[in-house]
Image (cartoon, rainbow, N blue to C red):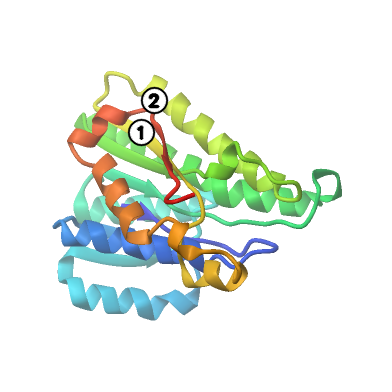
Amino acid sequence: MQCDAAGKPASSDNRGWRESGQHVMATFLSEGAHVLGVEHGEEQREHLRVMEEVHGGRFLGMLADVTNEEGVEAVRAEAQELFGNPEILVNLVGGFTHGQMLWELDVAAWDHMMALNLRSAFLCCRALIPGMIKEGYGRIVNMASKRATAIRPGAAVYSISKAAVVTLTQALREELKGTGVTVAAVTPSAIDSEAARKSMPKADPSKWVSPDDLAKGIAYLCSEDGGLFSGGILPAYGGQ
């Protein structure tokens, strides 16, 4: 199952996250996996319908808000009914905001970043890990960011939320030892997407992370051999 929904950060276009999620789904499907792809927003319904037509019974698209318990429980129930206990969870929900120092930030903006980048990953992990433990096998990949440690003034709340994803990953690794369930995180720098190119027109996208390469890396972490890297916080910096 892939939790790939995204809300609307206060000062960001989330299409970059969505584009990355679509590449990840395509990669898993190309390798023969059954995928439950979760999006957020009615505007994504047609895209999911087309993917269902193309991939037949190996893909199901679902609209849900995975920043709340009800949405996540609906996703878990749907996945279990269709595929049994999911073996793989890729948490790609995300958002970015910038332009305010921490002491200027209102509580709603803080809560929004924590919900998108941390709460969503926590809720999806909490929902699916018991089934993975029962089966004795599972792979989880969380999306952190280079900005978890490379902090920029005015975007610190994003860094804090992604640093928390790193800690979540490391904590789960310790708690999942011996269960057959592994967890890792990737920390990409700028990901090449239409949205990123529009927001940073003077940057050199040739140095950014390719969505295809990122998707292949995530797929490897979810493979049998990828379990070796449980607890790993793996940089994906491209040419930066």
Could you tell me residue 199's position as x and y percent?
Answer: 61, 69
Left or right of 135 in this view: 64: right
Looking at the rendered structure, the secondary structure element under dot 2 is helix
The residue under label 2 is: 173
Residue pictured at 31% horizontal, 52% vertical: 1
Q: Is residue 197 above or below residue 71?
A: below
Left or right of 91 in this view: 130: left
Q: CA distance from mark 2 to mark 1?
A: 6 Å
CA neighbours of label 1 inside 10 A, class few (<14), some (14 to 19), many (20+):
many
Q: Is residue 85 above or below residue 3?
A: above
Mark 1 or mark 2, which is nearer the start of the sequence? 2
Counting labels gives 2
Q: Is residue 27 above or below residue 189?
A: below
Q: Is there a contact, CB below 8 Å, between mark 2 and mark 1?
A: yes
Q: Quadrant of residue 176?
A: top left
Residues 233 and 173: in front is: 233
Residue pictured at 34% horizontal, 73% vertical: 48
Q: Quadrant of residue 157?
A: top right
Residue pictured at 20% horizontal, 61% vertical: 29
Residues 187 and 133: in front is: 187
Could you tell me residue 185's position as x and y percent?
Answer: 42, 38
Residue pictured at 35% horizontal, 35% vertical: 129
Residues 7 and 69: in front is: 7
Residue 23 visible, this orientation: yes
The residue under label 1 is: 183
Which residue type carries mark 2? Arg
CA neighbours of label 2 inside 10 A, class few (<14), some (14 to 19), many (20+):
some
